Image (cartoon, rainbow, N blue to C red):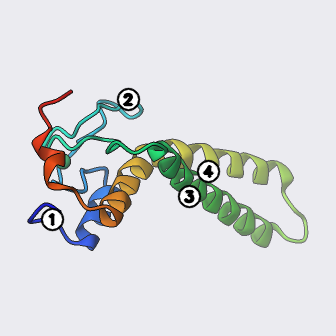
Amino acid sequence: MVQNSPSVLRMLLRGLIRRCAHCGQRGAFFVSWFKTQDRCRGCKLLWQRNMQGFVLGALAINIVLTGAALIATLVVGVVTSYPDLAIVQLLVSTIGVTLVVGVVGYPISYTTWLAIDLIMRPIESGELANSHIE
Ligand SMILES: [Zn+2]
């Protein structure tokens, strides 16, 4: 484990605002909203940390967030329009919320998953030392 690792709360907060969970670098892994680079711009931490299935964890977070937003929108829509359900408005609002949360949450789910991964598997001493290898 590398010395001076940030606290669990700090790593999670950094992940939630799209920063590197380890060094706090803004825009560390995303060149654009959907395009990533392999290493953090600040600490050179490898994005997927040599772990197969890393993307699966990030996608699971995005799916759970999107599904929760969809269900919340559906429940609010049904409760507010009951007993005369406004089907068209419900469809438009749930589809809209699903698209917005899915797209907006895409990079956030990745950096949050990296934070969770760093909490579960702290950085090994050689992980940053080998940062010159591309
Ligand atoms: Zn970093």
Q: Position of residue 9 (x, y in %)?
A: 28, 72
Gap in Å between the C-alphas at discs 3 and 2?
21 Å
Residue type indicated by callout 2: Lys
Gap in Å between the C-alphas at discs 1 and 3?
27 Å
Residue type indicated by callout 4: Val
Q: Which residue is mark 4?
A: 97
Res 118 label: none
Q: Position of residue 124 (x, y in %)?
A: 20, 55
Q: Is residue 43 left or right of residue 73?
A: left
Q: Which residue is mark 1?
A: 5
Label 3: which secondary element: helix
N-terminal-most mark, 3 or 4: 3
Residue type indicated by callout 1: Ser
- Which mark is nearer the camera, 2 or 4? 2
**Cβ atoms under marks 3 and 4 closer than 8 Å:** no
N-terminal-most mark, 4 or 1: 1
- Residue 46 occupies which quadrant of the picture? top left
Q: Position of residue 51 (x, y in %)?
A: 40, 45
Residue located 75% across and 70% down the image: 80
- Which mark is nearer the camera, 1 or 3? 1
Label 1: which secondary element: loop
Gap in Å between the C-alphas at discs 2 and 4?
23 Å
Gap in Å between the C-alphas at discs 3 and 4?
11 Å
Q: Which residue is mark 3?
A: 65
N-terminal-most mark, 1 or 3: 1
Q: Pointer 3: residues within 10 angstroms few (<14), some, or many (20+)? A: some
